[in-house]
Amino acid sequence: ELLRENINQILDGNDAYICLAFPNWGESRVNDERFLCRIDKITDRPMKIVNDSAAGWAGSLGLEEGINLVAGTGSIAYGQNKFGTEARAGGWDDGFSDEGSCYWLGKKALELFSKESDGRVKKGKLLEIFRYNFNLKNDFDLIDIFDEVYKNNRTKTAELQKLLLQAAMQGDEEAIRLYEAAAEELALIIGAVYRKLEFSGDTIVSYSGGLFHAGDFILKPLVRKLEENGICLCPPKYSPVQGAALLAAREYSRDGEFLSRIKAGLE
């Protein structure tokens, strides 16, 4: 109902080709089939459906060959080569995947707090940041807070990465190491797509997602890991939303004229 309402409002009677980019698309045959059976209830316009990682790639690289890494609440990499062959890695499930993401780092931040509190690692700024943020009278009070607020809430757990970032900015060595560990995981995800698509030599990788608000804490170690394999990290050209528009234009305009006009409008 929400999709139908928004599509009708946006189009307002105009002709258009539509690209819908969804998280989890292509990961569950049952859910994909359920959605496909209901498309005619949304709109009768021509429609292309992709995983949202494909829209991220299309936007970040402007439909050019290469790989896009998304590291926000979750983590996933998607790419295409010059033949149009596509591949992805990561992003399986938050219970056993999404390595290097904000959610992953949020869980690691909780783990680091317990280690710093115990003395299993050197006490750092994260300890006092957590104590202040959660108004802890006793460090064990965090257990109840976790069970009530964070245990089954992926988004809120991902937001704990912001506290980890504060600790890293204040020189917490263990917090800084966690960003380096995240960079290693993200480099593995990118490397898997790189090999699947049989890239060689200089390959462009772009990125998007909230994790990159951490700046050099995540970018420097990630760039270093990628450069070891001849992979160049570059800022995104366009947004994922604009990427979906580019995918729709490419599908609709086989002669390339409409796509060229869309690209010109984004410059």
Image (tube, rainbow, N blue to C red):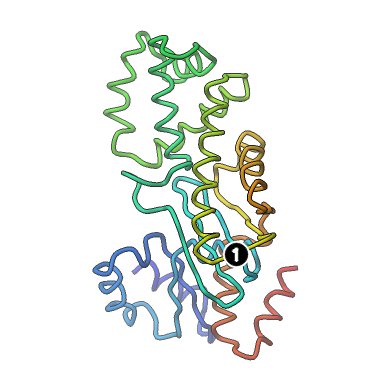
Tell me the SS state at disc 1.
loop
**Residue placed most toward the observer, 37 or 177:** 177
| Residue sitting at x 36%, y 41% | 154
Q: Nearer the viewer, residue 79 or 22?
A: 79
Left or right of 34 on screen, residue 198: right
Position in image of residue 23 (x %, y %): 41, 60
The residue under label 1 is 199
Q: Examine the rendered structure and indicate whether residue 126 appears above or below residue 186.
A: above
Q: Position of residue 216 (x, y in %)?
A: 67, 36
In the image, 246: left or right of 52?
Answer: right
Between 126 and 65, the one lying in front of the other is 65
Query: Hey, which quadrant is residue 95 in on the image?
Result: top left
Q: Is residue 201 left or right of residue 21?
A: right
Q: Relative to residue 176, is residue 15 depicted above or below?
A: below
* Identity of the residue drawn at 53% across and 53% down: 191
- Position in image of residue 212 (x %, y %): 60, 43
Quadrant in which the C terminus is drawn: bottom right
**Residue density around tag 1, few if under 14, some if 14–19, many if 20 or more, within 10 Å:** some
